[in-house]
Amino acid sequence: MQPKTIVAIVADEADLDRVLACAEPLAERFGARLTVVHGDALPMPTASPMGFPDTGLLDAAMETARERSEAMRKAVAARRGPVKAQWQSFLGFAGDASRQVAQAARTADLVIASQADPASSRSMPVDALLFETGRPVLFVPYAGTVDPAFRKAVVAWNGSAEAARAAFDALPLLVAADSVSILCVDPRAGEGEAAEFAGAEIAEALTRHGARVTVVNEPAAGLAPGEAIENHLAESAADLLVMGAYSQSWLKQFFFGGATKTLLASMPVATLMSR
C-alpha cells in the first residue's frame, strides 16, 4: 500500500530543507498529502529573586518561539517544490510539545524526520517518535545529502517482530528500489527460522510483491551488530537502511548499547525504523 499521508517533522530552520528535500519528492511520487509539523519546547519557568515564577522570561521565550514558527511557516509556504505542504505548529513545555507532535503523526502512513543533531538544542527526541507515534519513521541524516529515489536498500533482518514490521512498512520503497539486500548478521537458529535459512522467508515474501531481493548472511567478525551493519552499508554503497527499532529492550540498549542506538547515532544513510 502506497503512503497517502506523509508527515514531515521539523524542529528548526536547518531541519526544514533537510527533511523536505526528502519528503516532497516522496509525496509527489506517491500522490500523498504532505503535512509539515513543528513543535517548539518552552523552557521551564524559573523563579524570580522574590520566589515567584518569572513570567517575563517565559513571555519572551514564547514570543521568540512564535516568531520562529511563523518564519518557518512562511518558508514552507514559499517553497516551490513539487507539492504544496500543509502546516501545523505546537508550542508547549518539552514533554507537552513532543507529545503533541507525536499525536499529530499518528494518522500518517509515513513520518519523515531528521536524525537528532547533537549540535542543536531543539532536535525532536527520536525515541518519542519511535515509541509514541506508532508509525514508521524515515530518519534523514543531519549530515550529507539524501537521494529520495532510494535505489539500493538494505533490510537489517534478525527475525524479530520489529524487523518484520519495518520491512513491510517500507514495502513501497523496497519495491521501487533497484536492489534490496536482506542482511543477517551472525544468523542463529531461533525466531522460527533455521540459521542456514535466515532471511529466506522474508526475501520470498518481498519478492512476491516485486522487490528485487538477495540475502546476505554476514559474520560479525567480532563486531557488534550495529557496527557490522555500518560496515555493510559502506561496502555496498546502499542509500537506504530498513530496520526494526529496539528489538531488545530500550533500557538494555540505553545502558549497554545495541544496533538501534548505534545507527541512530551514526546514521550513514537514510534509515526507516518501525517499532
Image (tube, grey):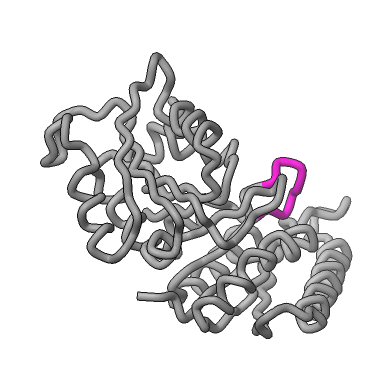
- Can you say whether 249 is above or below 173 in the image? above
Residue 161 lies, in percent from the top left, at 25, 50
Q: Residue at x 64, y 73 (%)?
A: 24
Q: Which quarter of the rendering shows the C terminus?
A: bottom left
Q: Which residue is at 37% across, 21% downward? A: 220
Question: Residue 227, image x and y in percent?
Answer: 48, 27
Question: In the depicted view, which residue is nearer to us: 48 or 144?
Answer: 144
Q: Dividing the picture into quarters, in which one does residue 28 lie?
A: bottom right
Above or below, 254 against 109 in this view is: above
**Viewer-closest of 246 and 225:** 225
Residue 186, position in %: x, y? 29, 25
Foreground residue among 242 and 236: 236
Side of 62 relative to 185 (left or right): right
Quarter where residue 274 is shown: bottom left
Location of residue 177 by image quarter: bottom left
Quadrant in which the N terminus appears: bottom left
Residue depicted at x 76% and y 42%: 119
| Predominant SS of the magenta segment | loop
Residue 39 vertical position relative to residue 29 in the rendered view, above or below? above
At horizontal 83% and vertical 69% (from top left) the residue drawn is: 68
Q: Residue furthest top?
A: 222
Q: What span is colored magenta in the figure?
A: 117-123
